[in-house]
Image (cartoon, rainbow, N blue to C red):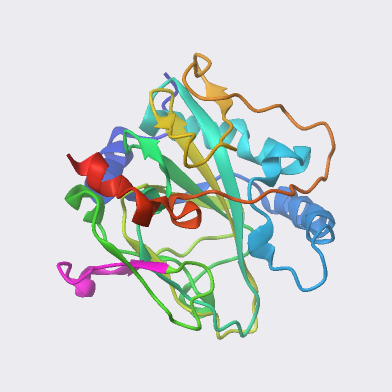
Amino acid sequence: MTQALHLKQIQDFKNQGFLTGLPVFSAVEMDKINQELANILNLLKPGESTKEIREWHETSRFLFDICMDTRILDYVESLLGTDFYMWASNFFIKESRSTETVGWHQDAYYWPLHPVESATVWLAFDDVDEGNGAMQVIPSSHGHGMVEHHRTNRADDSVLSLQADVSQFDLGTVVSIPLKRGSISIHDDKLLHTSPANPSNRRRAGFTIRYSPNRVKCDLKINPHFRVFPARGETCQINPLGEIPMRRYGRLFRQHQSIEESGKERETGFWTRQKR
């Protein structure tokens, strides 16, 4: 088993639900990556949001290679074990002076995955700090399990339509997650997190990558498009495998299917079933 993380870091992740400031790409590498990002952005239609760049690792070798970078996988292996797969990616780009916010939520609430034990890598394409909308977390909130989420009509929250009930938590413990470009944070799928607007003159671009142990299975009735890419160890046998993309830059045309997007969170009470 690869030990890219110290035992204290692994314990901190278990206790706090996140790690931050893990170096991956050098400044030279990030210069090239950001240059290539322009080719991905050019695939968007006029007026289309960058949030549409979701699971494009299935069609873009450029993004697939980032998701499968051995340095990132080494960190993830230290936390998830020797057998895991990659299954999702998404850009969260807040341009300068953006008023968009992301409400409090748990990633796992949106995913039809069981058991709940996945991890999200957040790769900074830019320097990220409190001035340009860094992610904020409630440390150790993952230890409380899944919390209720309610529909929100906030006009400035154009990323998520559900927000977690954080009334039981002390918001005085909230911490921001600053990152230098080329570095990553990793957080547990049950960790409560949010992000404010970006009032600065600087872009805040982050790329999330999702990984799960091989024992985690997707409910294909909710997300029939789910595809996994073996990252380390044995090949996952319980989920459909994806095909490695051949094109350097390619976009994905597909209706996304999270629990919330599919409507299953209301129709089937997915999380009620999972709690039993």
Q: Position of residue 248 (x, y in %)?
A: 83, 40
**Residue range highlighted in magenta:** 162-175
Residue that sits furthest to the left in the current view: 168
Q: Residue at x 69, y 68 (%)?
A: 49
Query: Is residue 27 toward the left or the right of residue 185 in the image?
Result: right
Is 167 included in the stretch rendered in magenta? yes
Q: Residue at x 61, y 85 (%)?
A: 97
Residue that sits furthest to the front in the current view: 267
Query: Is residue 163 toward the left or the right of residue 240 in the image?
Result: left
Quarter assignment of residue 114: top left
On the question of residue 240 being in view, the answer is: yes
Q: Position of residue 165 (x, y in %)?
A: 25, 68
Image height of 171 relative to 239, above or below = below
Give 38 or 42, whichever is nearer the viewer.
42
Q: Position of residue 103 (x, y in %)?
A: 40, 71
Q: Residue at x 28, y 47 (%)?
A: 271
Q: Position of residue 255 (x, y in %)?
A: 64, 51
On the question of residue 4 being in view, the answer is: no
Give 237 or 57, whichever is nearer the viewer.
237
Give 30 or 52, whichever is nearer the viewer.
52
